[in-house]
Amino acid sequence: MISLIQGDITKQQVDAIVNAANSSLLGGGGVDGAIHRAGGPAILEECRAIRAKQGGCDTGEAVITTAGRLPAKYVIHTVGPVWNGGHNGEPNLLANCYRNSLQLAVANGVTTIAFPNISTGIYRFPKPEAADIAITTVQQFMANDNDLQQVIFVCFDDENYGLYKERLGGERQR
């Protein structure tokens, strides 16, 4: 089941929330900063350990950590693409963010997961195209996977919420 809500991803009581991280995994602004602030130092400690092991996280890839003080069990950190006109593979990289996050979730026994609007803030990915990519990728994944019970798109801003609501045919509450 795919659900849509408008709100704060750090408040979601799910198995995993997805963080729109930067490649350093050391926190930042937007969703990334909010998750690190709300989750506390345990998330940053695990991110540092991942950096020490593999040197960060590439665009389109995903890694998993504890959720610290968040109501979720895990945080899946994925690095979205910076929009540079759409001719540098940005759409495919964004789809990979969702696909790789979902694969990592299933590999870790996650049945409920919440996504923010990856790359639509400071990374400037056009919101309508990003919504199409996110929804299509999740629908395709769920059509072939029976382990996930619920994927929630958590939109913080009115514009993204409206775009997702239109594409999903109205709000679906959890």
Image (spheres, grey):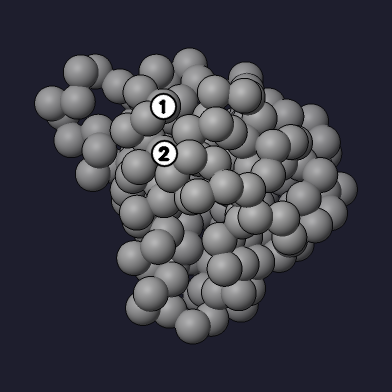
Secondary element under disc 2, as helix, strand or loop, is helix
Residue that numbered label 2 is attached to: 131
Point 68% across, 44% down: residue: 5
**How crowded is the residue under tag 2: few (<14 C-alpha within 10 Å), some, or many (20+)?**
many
Per the image, the residue denoted by label 1 is 127
Query: Residue 71, located in which quarter of the rendered image?
Result: bottom right
- Seen from the viewer's position, the closer of residues 53 and 160 is 160
Q: How many marks?
A: 2
Tag 2: amino acid: Ala
Q: Residue at x 66, y 30 (%)?
A: 156
Q: Where residue 70 appears, x then y in whole percent?
A: 82, 48
The answer to whether 62 is drawn above or below residue 87 in the figure is below
Task: Confirm or deny contact between disc 2 and disc 1 (CB under 8 A).
Answer: yes
Question: From where the camera sits, is residue 88 visible?
Answer: yes
Residue 129: % across, % down: 32, 33
Measured as percent of width and height from the top left, residue 165 is found at 54, 41
Task: Give the residue displayed 43% in from the left and 79% down from the top.
Answer: 145
Dividing the picture into quarters, in which one does residue 38 lie? top right
- Residue at image x 30%, y 22%? 83
Q: Is residue 126 left or right of residue 30?
A: left
Horizontal arrangement in the rendering, residue 60 relative to residue 32 (left or right): left
- Residue at the extreme left: 87
- Between residue 44 and residue 162, name the one nearer to us: 162
Q: Quadrant of the C terminus?
A: bottom right
Q: Which numbered circle lies on residue 32? A: none
Helix, strand or loop under label 1: helix
Q: Position of residue 23 (x, y in %)?
A: 44, 33
Q: CA distance from mark 2 to mark 1?
A: 6 Å
Q: Nearer the viewer, residue 93 or 171?
A: 171
The quadrant of the image that shows the N terminus is bottom right
